[in-house]
Amino acid sequence: MISNFIKTIMEEDLASGKHSEIITRFPPEPNAFLHIGHARAIVTNFELAKCFNGKTILRFDDTNPAKEEKRFMDAIINDIAWLGYTPYKVTFGSDYFDDDYAFAINLIKEGKAYVDDLTKDEMREYRGTLDTPGKESPYRNRSVEENLKLFEEMKEGKFDEGEKTLRVKIDMKSSNLNMRDPAIYRIIKKPHPHTGDKWNIYPLYDYAHPLQDAEEYITHSLCSLEYVEHRPLYDWVIENTKPMSVPRQIEFGRLNIEGTILSKRYLKELVESKLVDDYDDPRMPTLVGLKRRGFTPESIKEFVLSTGLSRINSEIPLNVLDHFLMDDLKLKNVRRMAVLNPLKVTITNYDEGKVEYLDFPNNLENEELGSRKISFSKHLYIEKEDFVEVKPNNKYKRLSLGAEVRLMGAYFIKANEVIKDENGEVVEVLCTYDKETLSGSGFNARKPQGTIQYVDASTAKKAEFRLFDTLIKNDANPDDELKDKFNPDSKQVVYGFVENCYEWEPEFKSQLMRNGYYSNDYDSKEDHIIVNRTVSLKQSFK
Ligand code: ATP
Ligand code: MG
């Protein structure tokens, strides 16, 4: 259940009778894929409305015709559905262009808006700085008639881009730079995907957004912290246009995650510079990337809800999200055995050609997931890192010469001898097994040194494992260029084996025992299994 300062405000507004229903909106600009930072905004808006049986509208902020793309809209709709939410309706900022225009005409008639001829650079100069007051534009006192005529001509396309803007008359000496006669319309001579070539002028965000909120009867307009400084303008627009309802803007802290970048611009740059494969590269913090990597919508939602909302931006350590994935899948997922860096093991006292199928539960902590038959024979693979010739100390829990370990779900084996290649590297371990020690047979007189996983070489399937690390280098300097911040070791591909029962299908998820949580890649095929590591057990226990 969601609980935060915004919910408290909503409760008060319902109790006081200010509102009878809660209506929120999620207003993405369809110019990129959504990232997990957006998930904070999505979950917050939908969950808060849900608390009060309210509504959440998905509104595409498409007031700038230069940036929008259909594929981004489709992706946003899919991402929201993937998170488990259904918008009450889907709208477009451009749906309100006529009204935005009508309100602007009124502002001109009331002497509150004027057409300015200052160029962009001049306007910046006139605006002043935090330390110096701004100067009024020489065009500020044009008559209402002249302003109406010029604005009409802007709309009809008589002027070029940049030649004129419509500004509202507020206060050039305001300590808030956003209040120094902000522009509310500029000329853009591009057809718009929804309104075609009807308009040569487009409203700016700070003017259009509050009006859109008002027209949709949004009660609480939630946005991230960088809009605090824009709130006075938001309120000014509402007070001075007197639209159909009075929405309230409330800001919350942005989500940041260590080791990655939550900014559309940079994510776009990563894709365009081909540092990553695409927006759904499993290293990306995009929702499509997290999905491909194996994260579940439940884990992302829980992550957002549990990390909470505050009025300050927060930076969350990377492994917090991992924790929620493990929490979600620990009992839900089947467990499987895999060997990523294989080392041959031969059981010298086991008959050549014999294969046994041993019953093994799919999840030791959840009987409901049933069991499977794991094969066992004379030739096995174990992880290279699960063997050393001489054990370093008594804490060592894996295989070493002269010692015994249990193979998961199977027998105790004892390492007796190694075979080395010409470089002196161990390529095979010769072991003996004790057939009285079958897992679950009740025999427990000796304690093995440890328990390790294995796969049977006669039935194991080859697999490609894709292991991921942080997108951004640990020691990256915030001022570095993106290409220098990028971690070149963020993806590593290793080849190994999965057990005979392993499922090859894309998106199949399992816990690979003693290793981590994995999900098959979209490109996984029966004859070429590709497994993405979602979360490493080893890392997160560090
Ligand atoms: P970016 O800064 O990545 O370009 P944006 O804020 O420009 O993102 P929008 O499409 O405008 O992207 O975002 C839609 C909503 O998502 C906004 O209300 C914004 O405040 C919110 N949002 C974006 N990033 C985050 C974040 N990291 N944490 C919380 N909310 C976010
Ligand atoms: Mg934005």
Image: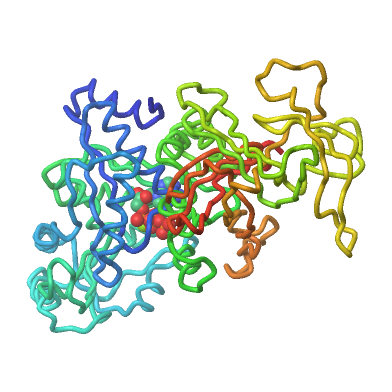
As drawn, is 508 to the left or to the right of 538? left
Residue 47 in sight? yes
* Number of marks: 0
Residue 533 x/y as whole percent: 56, 49
Seen in the image, is 142 located left or right of residue 486?
left
Quadrant where the N terminus lies? top left
Front residue of this view, candidates 126 and 30? 30
Relative to 200, say whether 298 is above or below: above
Residue depicted at x 57% and y 29%: 360
Asked if residue 21 is positioned above or below residue 98 in the image, the reply reads above
Where residue 193 appears, x then y in whole percent? 18, 69
- Residue 356 is drawn in which quadrant? top right
Residue 226 in view, yes or no: no
Left-right relation of 279 to 100: right
Where is residue 382? Give x, y as percent.
Answer: 72, 44
Q: Quadrant of residue 109?
A: bottom left
Q: Residue at x 13, y 47 (%)?
A: 243
Quarter of the image where ligand 2 sits: bottom left
Residue at 82%, 46% in the rendered image: 429
Give the colour scheme shown: rainbow
